Every structure is written in C-alpha cells, then in structure tokens.
Image (cartoon, helix red, strand yellow):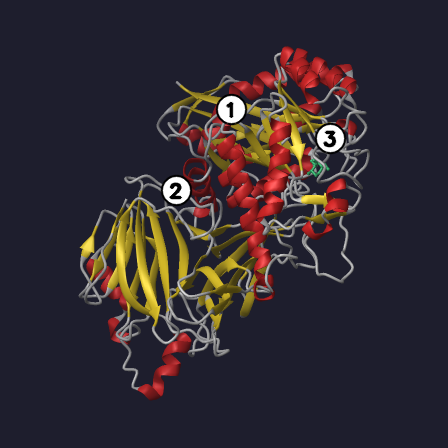
Amino acid sequence: MIREYETAVHYNAWSNPGVTCEEKMRVLRLDNEEITYAMAVSEEGYLMHVYFGSRVADEDDILYLLRIAESPYTPHHHLREKLAFMGTRPFEYPCHGIGDFREPCLMLMDADGMSAVDLRYKSHRIAEGKPQLRQKGVSCLPATFAGKNEADTLIVTMEDAHAGLTVELYYTIFRHKNAVTRAARITNHSYNDTRILRALSTCVEFEGSAYDMITLNGAWARERFLSRVPLHAGKQSIDSVRGESSHQHNPFLALVSGDASEESGEAYGFNLVYSGNFFAEAEITEHGNTRVVMGINPFDFSWMLRTDEEFVTPEAVMVYSDAGIGKMSRTFHDLYRENLIRGEWKDRKRPVLINNWEATYFNFDQDKLFGIAEQAAKLGIEMLVMDDGWFGHRDFDNSSLGDWVVYEEKLKGGLKPLVDKVNALGMKFGIWFEPEMVSEDSNLYREHPEWAIQIIGRELTQGRAQYVLDYSNAEVREYVYGMLRSILDSANIEYVKWDMNRQLTEVGSTTLPRKRQRELWHRYVLGVYELMNRLTTDYPQLLLENCSGGGARFDPAMLYFSPQIWTSDDTDAIERLKIQYGTSMCYPVSAMGAHVSDCPNHAVGRVTPFDTRGDVALVGTFGYELDVTRISEEDRNRIPAQIAKFHRFNPLVRTGDQYRLGNPFSDDCYDAWMFVAKDKSEALFTFVRILATANMPSITVKLHGLAPDRRYLCEETGQVLSGKAWEKCGIIIGVNRDFTSQTFYLKAI
Ligand code: DGJ
C-alpha cells in the first residue's frame, strides 16, 4: 500500500525504515543495514546524486559528502556561471538541452519541435514495500517485487513547468539485499502532444574513473562471454538494436574497482529488466568522473504522449558489493530467485527432462519420440520435451511457423495419444513453440501477410526463412494465443519452451498510425510480455522455459515470466564453462538451462567425458539432449547415477551461494566453483580440468564461503578440516586428463 505524502512546501522530514528525507540538508536517502543511496536537491530544484555505496547513514557523513564547502549543490550560480554548473554536476536524471552535455536520460520532441527538458524537484512521497510498476493501457511490466517489510520506496516527482511534464523517479531499496531499483514515469500534462525521444531508466554518477567495466558479449552459441576493461576517456557502451536483448550484448554492465577480484574490491552491477533494444554506457567526463546510464535504447525510439498519457521505463536493478565481484553476483542471484522469478516452479526442483532437438532435429515421429521416452523413463528421466517440428508440415526450418496445428504425418491422431502414452510411463510431457514468428510458407502468412512486421512496399528480409509477427497488434496476439491454448488444452502438457529465432528488420506495422510507427520496437516487447503473462496466469502450473536461438533472451524480464531460460545452443561442456561463468555474473544457476548432450558435440565437435558433461549441466536446470536409444551402452549406464547426483545436490546448487573459484576466460588449465548452503551446513565443490599439460604439478584450489570455525568432512577424501583451513589450504587436485571433472562434497560435522 502506498502512503501518499505530497509536500506543500518543497522539502519535508519524513522517514520510514529505509527512506529518510531531511529538509535541513535537502537530502533524500535510502539506506539498509549495509548500503546507502543518497541524493540532494539544489537551491534551484535540481536533483543531484550524492552517493551510492557502503552505508553512510550518519548525518555528519552525509553532510561531508555534500561538500558544502565546494557548494556543488547550492552553487553561487549567478546566472553567468550556470552553464559550468550544469555541465559538471552529478544529476540523478539528466536532461537534454539545458547545459549538461553528457549522456542524458531524457529528451523530447515537443509540439514546437523543441527537444530540451528541464526537470525540477516538485515533491516526494514514500511507500512501504514496492509498488507494482504499471503504465495505463499496458497489461504487464516485468519488475522485481517486494512485500511491505522487504523494501522501501521513494518516489520523487520532478516537473518541467514549461513543457507541462512530470517525471516520477521510483527508487526502491531492499531491506536485506544490497540492491536499489529505479524506474521513471513520464506524464504529459500539457494540452499538446509531445514525443519522447529518449527515456532511460537510471543514471549514477561516480567520483573518479578508476574502474574496470565488465560486460557480457558474444554471438549465437557464444553468449555472455565476459569482457573486463579499464574505463577510458569518452564514452563506452553496449546496446541492442535487434528488437531483443540479444546474443551480442546482455543488458548488464558492472563497474568494479581496478583491483576488484571475486572476493575483494568494490563492484557496482547494473541490469535492465527488459527484453528489447537496450543501451548501457559509462562515460568519463571532462573532470575525470564517470556517469553510467542504462535504459531502452534511444536509437530509433520515439513514443508519443498525448495529454494525460504516461510512459513508464523498464526497471534498472543496481547492486553494490564491497567484497568483490562474487558478492555482487550472489546479491543478484538472491534478488532474482526471491524477488523476480514467480510462480509454481520458483522454488522447486525442476523435472529432469530429455529434449529431442539434438537427438532428432526435425526427423521424428511419435514412434521415435516414444522410443526415446521409454528408454529415458527406465533411466530416471522425468519429462520428454518435444522440440521444433511437430506442427504444420514442418520437416525443416523453412515452413509452418504460425500454423500451430499438429503435423499428423508425424503424430498420428494428434498430441493426446502420444502424451497419454508418455504420461503412462510416469513422465511429464513438454512442447516447443515459437509464437512470435510466421514462416513465409504458412497458412497464417498466406491469409494474413499484413500481420508480419514490415514496411509496406519494401522487400522483407527473411531470417531462417521466417518473419516476425506484429505483436503491437492485439488481433495478432489474440489469434496466436488462441492457437497456443487449443494445443495446450488438447493434452496434458506441463512444460513449454518459448523460442524466438530471428531479430527484427523493416520495423513497421500495418496498423499503427504514422506518428506511432517508431513505437513498434517497444510495443512489440510489451506484446510479448502480455502473452507470456496471459500464458502463465491461465496455466499457473506450467513450467515455462524461455529461449531465443539459444540464449539471446537471457534477461531479467524473461525471468519474471519463466524460472529458467535456455542458456545457449552450444552444449559442449568446455564451451559451457565460459558461457555459464559469464551468465552467472548476474543470473542464478537455478535459471540456466543446461543439458548433457552427445559427443562429438554438435556445435564444436569436441569429445568430453560423459561425467564432465553431467557435472557441468548440474550447474543449471539439468537435463538431456541426445538420443538415449543410440548413445553407447557405457554412457547410457551412467545416466541413473548422474540423475541421482542431480537429485542429491540440486537443492544445494539451486538455493545455495555460488563461489567462482576459477576463471575460464583467463585460464585454460581449469575451472572450479562451489555452492555453499545458506546455513553453511554443506557445500559442493566442482573442478573441471580444461587442458592438462605433461609433468604438471597438482593444483590447489582454495575454498570460499564456509563457516571458518565449523569443521567439514570431505566425503571423497575423508579429511576433516575447519572452514578456515579449507579456505587457507584448499583442495588438492592431482594430475588428470583433458576435460575431466571431479566433485567434492563437504558436510559440517
Ligand atoms: C533454437 C533453440 O535454441 C534450440 O534449442 C531449438 O529449440 C531450435 N531453436 C529449434 O528450432
């Protein structure tokens, strides 16, 4: 519930456990036990950033941070020097066109064709908990959530009286997690239409520039490779202009102190809860300070606001760690597991699945699938997932998307007979869809070519022989959803893999008015959210896994709808070390789709031991993606033990704290990690040899996260040591061969 507190005068002293607003100092502050986020209002009403980092809640300390002596927040700005003030000061939500020449958050095209915005403080209010992010006319905006006693929210209303615009800046601090979220609501109160040209979600100003920037970049089958580079003069950014969050760059950016390691140094992580075009940038300014901004990509963006209409930006999540990159990641993991992922499967062990994609590709029928299921059931696999190729007349990737009716030549009598038979084996059944797409060769496209995203009169670019449906059009969404429903209602389907296999081109809609065409990028994403929300609301028991040509939609917004996302089409255990390491920067392993596949691996041709493939997939949702009827007897026989290992350790891995102990980006010798239970009662340590060298000495890997004074028994070696000793002396790994793995279980005694 929101406790409204509109101020009559400009500043008010009023607090709740997490938010303090002090009139004397004009300071607005969010604190929890470990962190503080502080801002201040200047004499002219500008909202300035003061501080984000370890808790500084003492009034005197804040006063010091305000640097009254230097007067940055109360400048003697006699008009002739105002420009210098505007160009260097740390703004909370910088505007374009009024003298701040750095990257702005807000830029307009008003009725007169002007683009400047000048926001001044108007009022603020405080809410217990976290109000849901809503925009009139939009059914669902994904965001983190929190109960009344979990978070505190400050809403600062800024106003541009000239433009007749208000911007409400939403700040939420979590009481027990070192995270602050931000979003902005922009409302047009004028009589004229105005057009938003950019509306970012967050801006944080840092003193100095002695930071490294971490980003997650890649390509298909190489998602979220980690890059860490020192900041340099000027602007450094990542973005997507592809209509989805993308394989190429993830909407994540971290600034870490130059000396930051996994366990020490400062780290600030930024992650955008958004699945479309995004933009994230660090800019070193003229005096050597750093501005970080993040939000919807302003490139090719525009959004018209008529009188009284509003626009709400996606949420940006900001995490602070004073103890290294590892702690930053663990904060993200906790936040996403507890305050972002929803639904029935949020806290549950997922069924061990077998997916037929790498087993059969398009070449299957009911007998083939049932044969796989029969064999899989005997080995302890719990769900069969039928991937691409079951609908229309889909024998290859060039047809039938949009025709979500069963391909009877492959599945005689429809889905129900197969699903019933699979259920009779004691297995669940799951199915693949690509609901946003339409093949040129499809009844849907023949009947409704106008439903594809397009620029009328221009040649449409194909990608995988398909086009993207115009999800800004409610009729399209309704039609597609109707088809999904009739399939889901036709049999006992308990899992859906929602795929998306091409990016957007010729971005135009046959139904949006001319003035709103550039809104399609964002309206498309909102349309996807609406359908996912309907699906998960209508089928609350359904386990939804997101996917986009592998892991191109591994973003927090997708986690709001699905507790797991397919991480990459590269299932090679060694390649996965990097992919899963990068992904774990901000996403929990409970969300990472990871399967044991066949060798030679289909993506890279590498041959790795079956056990290593299992140990790497264990750090994810776990499942199989191979033809279990055709792999070697030896590998098949290993599956029951592998599954038993999953059942034993998944609760620990899924809910525990992750410690990265190796780094496959800087070391081609080994990777290692461990998961420690929240109560420190147990831990699982995994070591994967990458490349061995002859005559190599043993390697000692020091453990982390154990209780220093408790004693732990290592099940594999029988050694009992204190947590402190395990951290100091580590586990010694002897000589082993390329691509082998070992796990060690430690139990507090
Ligand atoms: C891309 C996905 O990442 C794969 O797992 C598979 O589902 C194919 N699409 C099917 O077309």
Number of the front mark, 2 or 1:
2
Q: Find residue 698 and report its image quarter.
A: top right
Where's residue 90, x and y in %? 38, 69
Q: Secondary structure at mark 2?
A: loop
Q: Secondary structure at mark 1?
A: loop
Q: Residues within 10 Å of mark 2 (few under 14, many from 20)?
A: many
Q: Which residue is mark 1?
A: 349
Q: Work out whether residue 590 or residue 563 is closer to the camera in this orientation and state it.
A: 563
Q: CA distance from mark 2 to mark 1?
A: 22 Å
Where's residue 351, x and y in %? 57, 22
Q: Residue at x 51, y 31 (%)?
A: 538
Q: Work out whether residue 699 or residue 401 is closer to the camera in this orientation and state it.
A: 401
Q: Does the residue at mark 1 contact the one at mark 3 (Cβ under 8 Å)? A: no
Q: Secondary structure at mark 3?
A: helix
Q: Residue at x 61, y 12 (%)?
A: 426
Q: Amino acid at mark 1?
A: Lys
Q: 93 above or below 162? A: above
Q: Which residue is mark 2?
A: 145
Where's residue 582, x and y in %? 58, 44
Q: Which of pointers 1 and 3 lies earlier in the amino acid sequence? A: 1
Q: Amino acid at mark 3?
A: Trp
Q: Amino acid at mark 2?
A: Phe
